[in-house]
């Protein structure tokens, strides 16, 4: 292994639950499986609006840039509410809060089904983002609590499999259903999914036992200050903010680009974009092998290189056939870079991991909301290709800076 690991500070999320080590590990696997279902739904809901932008623009008589507010509004709400759900997870138990958040997701999706105006749909997406904010970041924090650092990136890769399946389903199924039955049916499907998953999580007895364990004794303000006064933690937050802006600006508009530039239908465009998730799954299945060959800095550089080349191909080459391998390579690159960044982020504040990871996820979605909003303006006034080119160059520089900072820190 060429990985350089920071000093371990591990909080076992199952301490005091009783039973032998084998039983504990089995319980952790079951918990991770259940959290995977919640993460699947959350990631699907995150991306369902990407392929439906042309349909929304047509139905509400707006531009694609204006319709993209359904994406940026969701991201803003998701990011801000991280600051609430993180401390709640530390105080009341991460899995319990995740179950409640899953149930709350049904509200926004119910309103979206009947939204008569774009403004009402945006409000519905805000409510959905508010609820979904408590799912994936707290799941990552729970993994940080229960899995030792040396095994953590591989465990996160397994969790990413569920997230990526949701990403693929959210984009591709959304495109197909939008073409066949209309975009409202997507939100009806999400309503049913979160009702079932939320009830299943909330009724789990082991979650109720976990929720009664004492959590971090530090106050919310003290935990937050502890993270924000740590220069390394602040740097990681800056990196993930810029990463969100560049990665998801390119991602969000790719289906509409394929529709407007090459004349593909919505379902075909969303199917092409689903290759991004396939690339991510290729990473998750090969993560152990990659981690045995590359340092964390090497992983960051590899991810950045793939992202830069992929989006430059989309920006420069005027043939749709190149978009397919480029999209898949971009998926491999993003999850190679992001998993490295996320694994380091789990060590920002081990005693208050929920709060720290909520800040991390909040910054990611702050970057997404800023990036998508600015990209919408660029697209409305210039072109899609400028967005892809800017994102490609920005990701290359960002990954290089992050990789360099990892090497310098590991030399200390």
Image (cartoon, rainbow, N blue to C red):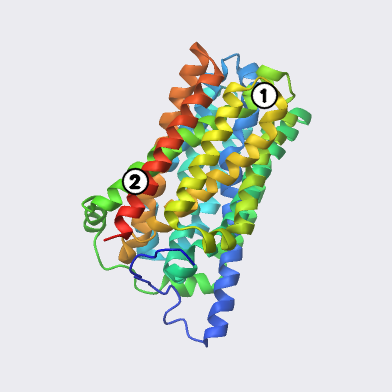
Q: Is there any visible trace of residue 76 in the rendered image?
A: no
Q: Can you tell which mark lies on residue 214?
A: none
For the C terminus, the image quarter is bottom left
Q: Position of residue 69 (x, y in %)?
A: 50, 26
Against 295, is 369 above or below? above
- Secondary element type, mark 1: helix
- Secondary element type, mark 2: helix
Q: Position of residue 10 (x, y in %)?
A: 38, 72
Q: Position of residue 129 (x, y in %)?
A: 49, 41
Against 17, is 207 above or below? above
Residue at image position (39%, 57%) is 344
Q: Can you tell which mark lies on residue 258?
A: 1
In this view, the residue in front, 146 or 9, is: 9
Residue at image position (65%, 17%) is 58
For the view shown, which residue lies furthest in the right direction?
A: 180
Label 1, residues with CA under 10 Å away: few <14, some 14-19, many ≥20: many
Q: How many marks?
A: 2
Residue at image position (36%, 42%) is 401
Against 133, is 293 above or below? below
In this view, the residue in front, 286 or 141, is: 286
Q: Can you tell which mark lies on residue 237?
A: 2
For the view shown, which residue lies furthest in the top direction?
A: 381
- Location of residue 159 by image quarter: bottom right
Against 283, is 210 above or below? below
Disc with the residue nearer the chain's start (2 vs 1): 2
In this view, the residue in front, 57 or 229, is: 229
In this view, the residue in front, 203 or 86, is: 86
């Amino acid at each position: 292994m060429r990985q350089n690991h920071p000093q371990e500070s591990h909080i076992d999320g199952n301490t005091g639950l009783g039973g032998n080590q084998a039983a504990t590990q089995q319980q952790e696997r079951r918990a991770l499986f259940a959290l995977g279902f919640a993460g699947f739904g959350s990631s699907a809901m995150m991306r369902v609006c990407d392929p439906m932008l042309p349909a929304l623009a047509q139905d509400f008589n707006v531009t694609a840039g204006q319709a993209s507010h359904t994406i940026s509004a969701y991201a803003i709400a998701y990011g801000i509410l991280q600051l609430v759900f993180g401390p709640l997870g530390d105080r009341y138990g991460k899995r319990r809060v995740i179950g409640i958040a899953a149930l709350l997701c049904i509200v926004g999706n119910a309103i979206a089904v009947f939204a008569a105006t774009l403004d009402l749909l945006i409000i519905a997406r805000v409510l959905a983002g508010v609820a979904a904010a408590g799912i994936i970041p707290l799941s990552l924090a729970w993994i940080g609590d229960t899995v030792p650092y040396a095994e953590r990136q591989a465990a996160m890769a397994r969790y990413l499999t569920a997230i990526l399946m949701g990403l693929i389903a959210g984009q591709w199924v959304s495109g197909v259903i939008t073409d066949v039955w209309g975009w409202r049916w997507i939100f009806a499907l999400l309503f049913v999914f979160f009702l079932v998953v939320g009830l299943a999580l909330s009724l789990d007895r082991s979650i109720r036992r976990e929720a009664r364990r004492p959590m971090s004794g530090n106050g919310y303000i003290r935990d937050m200050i502890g993270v924000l006064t740590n220069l390394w933690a602040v740097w990681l937050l800056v990196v993930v903010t810029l990463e969100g802006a560049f990665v998801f600006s390119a991602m969000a508009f790719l289906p509409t680009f394929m529709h407007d530039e090459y004349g593909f239908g919505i379902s075909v465009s969303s199917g092409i974009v689903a290759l991004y998730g396939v690339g991510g799954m290729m990473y998750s299945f090969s993560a152990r092998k990659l981690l045995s060959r590359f340092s964390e800095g090497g992983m960051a550089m590899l991810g950045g290189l793939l992202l830069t080349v992929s989006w430059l191909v989309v920006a420069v080459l005027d043939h749709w056939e190149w978009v397919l391998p480029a999209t898949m390579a971009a998926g491999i690159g993003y999850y190679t870079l992001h998993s490295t960044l996320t694994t380091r982020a789990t060590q920002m504040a081990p005693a208050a991991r929920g709060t720290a990871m909520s800040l991390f996820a909040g910054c990611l979605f702050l970057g997404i909301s800023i990036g998508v909003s600015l990209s919408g303006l660029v697209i409305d006034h210039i072109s899609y290709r400028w967005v892809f080119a800017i994102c490609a160059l920005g990701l290359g520089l960002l990954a290089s800076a992050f990789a360099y900072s990892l090497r310098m820190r590991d030399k200390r």
